[in-house]
Image (cartoon, rainbow, N blue to C red):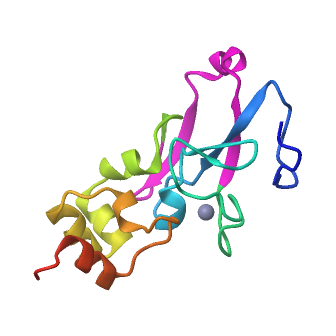
Amino acid sequence: MAAKRKRQPGLPSNDGVVRGYRWLATLDRSTCIGCAVRDGLSYDLDLEPVGHALPWGRGPGRRHAKCRCTMTPVLDDEFAKYMRGAWRPAVANGRAEQVPAETTYSQWFQRQSEAFQSEYLGPMRFSLLRKHNLDLIDLVDDAGRPLSYANLLQRFSPQS
Ligand SMILES: [Zn+2]
């Protein structure tokens, strides 16, 4: 057992029931890329990434000014089975809908219209995304920070 956990105040930590935390961003166009790529990612009780490499940092709701992210506890399997079939809200083009709770921002984003995607990313990032068939995660660095357009060009179109 870790003696010193880097717990964030206010997080539930009911050992045996809560196994960790899942980052929840808002499914709409105001969510920044840095938060969007963290949506749905899990962290253990020590706030270490589970199955991915993006750091918790200051955590949901504190990543940046006006961060609207929150988190949901990752429950032990025994308790998680009661949570299946949940839904989460999403808003695109002024229309609200409910999508299955396990839908991540990236998955949701890929289903949005070209107009939405282009407006969200800006035309230059959008064309890069299209041209190279990228995912949102390709637009951030190892710490989950958005890459500059110059960096993206270097990475994906070194010749142009
Ligand atoms: Zn956020």
Vertical arrangement, residue 33 with respect to residue 2, above or below: below
Q: Position of residue 92 (x, y in %)?
A: 42, 55
Which residue occupies the foreground of this view, 121 or 44?
A: 44
Residue pictured at 49% horizontal, 58% vertical: 36
Q: On the picture, is 155 further left or further right than 75? A: left
Count of numbered circles in the view: 0
**Ligand 1's quadrant:** bottom right
Residues shaded magenta? 70-97
**Quadrant of the rendered image containing residue 20:** top right
Whether the magenta-drawn stretch holds residue 72 is answered as: yes
Q: Position of residue 11 (x, y in %)?
A: 82, 47
Which residue occupies the foreground of this view, 10 or 42?
A: 42
**Quadrant of the rendered image containing residue 26:** bottom right
Q: Quadrant of the C terminus?
A: bottom left
Q: Position of residue 104 (x, y in %)?
A: 46, 44
Res 133 visible: yes
Residue pictured at 44% horizontal, 68% vertical: 141
